[in-house]
Amino acid sequence: MIQEIQVGIVDTRVPGDAGAEMVAPYSLGLTCKTTAVQATTQSLAVSVLDLIATRAGELTGSAIAKSVELARYAEQLGYRRYWVAEHHSIQGLACSATPVLIGHIAAVTKTIRVGSGGVMLPNHAPLVVAEQFGTLEAIYPGRIDLGLGRAPGGDVQTMRALRRGLAQDGDDFPALLEELRTYLGPERPGQVVKAIPGQNSNVPITLLGSSGLSAQLAAALGLPFAFAAHIAPDDLYSAAQLYREQFQPSKVLPKPYLLVAVQVIAAETDAAARRLFTTPQQRLLRAIRGESVELLPPVDSMEHLWHDAERAAVENRMRAAIVGSDTTVQGGLEKLVSDTHPDEVIVVTETYEHFDRADSYRRVAHIAAKILGTGDTYAG
Amino acid sequence: MLGDSGGRLRLSILDHTPVSSGSTLGDAFWHSTRLADLAEQVGYERYWVAEHHNMPWLASSSPAVLIAYVAARTTSLRVGSGGVMLPNYAPLAVVEQFGMLEELHPGRIDLGLGRSSGGDQIASHALRRTDQDYAPLLAELLAFFRGEFPVGHPYGSVTAVPGQGIMPNIWLLGSGTYSAQLAGAIGLPFGHGGHFAAANNVTAIEAYRQSFRPSPALQKPYAIVSVGVICAETDEIAERHHHAAYVSTVRNLSGTPGPLLSADEIENAPPGEWSPAQEHYVTELFSSHIVGSPSTVKAGLEALAHRTGADEIMIATIMHGYTDRLRSYELIADACLPRNSAQVGNTPAGSTRTAGFVEELRNG
């Protein structure tokens, strides 16, 4: 069945809101012809992580308008979640005020889960995070995810500006998490401070990380664990194994639930996909050099852009990336599944052109539908 | 942005997102969007959300998230915070949030800033509230927006993305003369929290005007005064709603906090906890409210404008019942705002109201 998905004209009315108009008049003219995705409950579950990458000189509002279209498209393609990251003081990444972005994207979609990937908890007071996500959950019930990380999301000075000299650092993470869960769970006897909204909202929490340490914390607490292989693939296999081995069943999760985030670019041919991949390659190269990380157009070859050592560093950091034609990407995803048995793959796709990004997500949705997943779900 | 009102009474809305008994927090937020819709249709100048913590009868604790919701569901209304309590946050975080909102809704966002905590002492502690002085916090916030840290400042290398160069309209809010004089000294608009500190409204606005120095943002002083109002078809109905709100507030502050109760619930239920000290406080608080029929409220608002010289009156209506509350704001608009509000620029062409907004809501 061929259907035409016109992402810009999706009906965004809230159920019960008869007569409401579209909430955001964005239409970038993104029109993708596609066959309906034939996924089953046994298909590999896929989700989206968006860092709201911008081109040089591009307004944040423009980049977010593209993300809004992508979120609507991902919803139609059957992606389970649309997560936005938290980064600060990085020209080229417009994902600083994560709860505001989540609210905006949830307002223009209807069913896809929307969440953080993740909120960097030591940057915030746990009560503030609980109130923000409690508010989102009250407005968009059953659709909000709270992914939590412990990194600064920026450089040292930025971290100081955000943490205001508080003693909060990565080492406090377990205590901050416990405080946060107090505000999101049922009211405890004698509890003096309550998150309103937030208390007893039980917004589903996922712990994010790229090390064995974060895997062990998630395992000990019986929480889902999302491994950030898109930025730090080194410990993927060992962390996945540790998480499963040490997992303690909890009230929210009877058995381990592993999400693996990887970069993916799918295109018509291997060569076309590899060319698109030079955009994120250039960005990482420039990040290593301490240069601006705004999106650059793809190039035919990286050869004249990097030195051998830089090439080695970039390729090492990006070695989990899955890039190629549909066939190649299917092979890559199948290998990832057989190596780590994720319950869900979080797909991170960044290209210079909006259409290439949407097209890649379309291809990946079809590919994932053909791959056997675990069939498990967490929060939707 | 802020010009001469030409003698016309300018009205705006301060929404605490009150929670009514029998309703969910989600209901309360949904009704805030209905209220914002009304504001847009009938010509209120702006719609602001408050910040309060640990109060089960007020759902508005995360202004930036709520503004994102309301702004996404309206098209031209100015939406803002009244206010963000700056010492509760890192200035950079506030700049990122409101820079993001301004990017998403260009020219529609107000950032009103306050100094208090919006909660009790223990909630302040949980918020990791800073004890740093307010003026340096405000300076840090403005420097992030403007990208103007002095050379050598530790945050000179830090950029608010988004935020730098993307500044909403900034307002200083206060209940006394400190923020009034600060706003005047740096040429920002000022909002007086008269809905909880009515006794100071004349003094504070006078202090603001006397200290005002023109700035690139504002050539002449512009002052808002807020006030608690309940309006209904008759004085008696309005007084009954007001009494219910009064009893609910005393009970909530006396140790049994919960949603706001209706007049029927108040009249039929056994009395709850009742602290004389809170009764005294709430009696004084509520004595400044303007309560009654449209003509009573209109006279009260005009007297307030005359007494304070405020350029705009911001109406805070905290009461049980969403349709009654919407109706209160609608009656005030009908009595006080020009019938054809197109001149305000808030009503989209072709959407002139033909029936009562609340009636439409009731009829689904």
Image (cartoon, coloured by chain):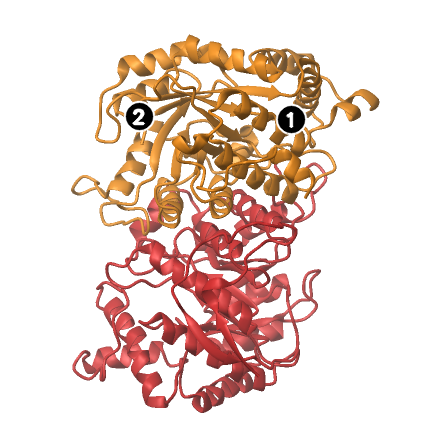
Chain colours: A red, B orange
Confirm or deny contact between disc 2 and disc 1 (CB under 8 A).
no
Q: Which residue carries the number 2 mark?
A: B3
Horizontal side of A59 relative to A372 (left or right) equals left
Q: In whole angstroms, how far apart are the C-alphas of marks 2 and 1?
A: 32 Å
Which chain is mark 1 on? B
Is B46 rendered above or below residue A158? Answer: above
Task: Using the image, tell me which numbered label, if any, was put on residue B24.
Answer: none
Do dots 2 and 1 share one subunit?
yes
* Residue at image point 43% right, 65% down: A50
The answer to whether one can see residue B134 in this image is: yes
Horizontal side of B210 relative to B108 (left or right) equals left
Which chain is mark 2 on? B
Rendered location of residue B295, percent (x, y) = 57, 14
Rendered location of residue B188, percent (x, y) = 30, 26
Q: Can you tell which of label 2 and label 1 is closer to the viewer?
A: 2
Rendered location of residue A118, percent (x, y) = 47, 59
Other-residue count near label 1 (Cα within 10 Å), few / some / many at <14 / 14–19 / ≥20? many
Is B301 rendered above or below residue A34? Answer: above
The answer to whether one can see residue A181 in this image is: no
Other-residue count near label 2 (Cα within 10 Å), few / some / many at <14 / 14–19 / ≥20? few
Type of amino acid at the residue the image marks with label 2: Gly
- Please tell me which of labels 2 and 1 falls first in the chain: 2
* Residue at image point 68% right, 25% down: B252
Task: Using the image, tell me which numbered label, if any, was put on residue B319.
Answer: 1
The quarter of the image holding the C terminus of chain B is top right
Q: Say which of A57 and B36 sits in front.
A: B36
Is A194 rendered above or below residue A158? Answer: above
Type of amino acid at the residue the image marks with label 1: Met
Give the tally of numbered discs.
Answer: 2
Residue B58 lies in quadrant: top right
* Residue at image point 46% right, 91% down: A327
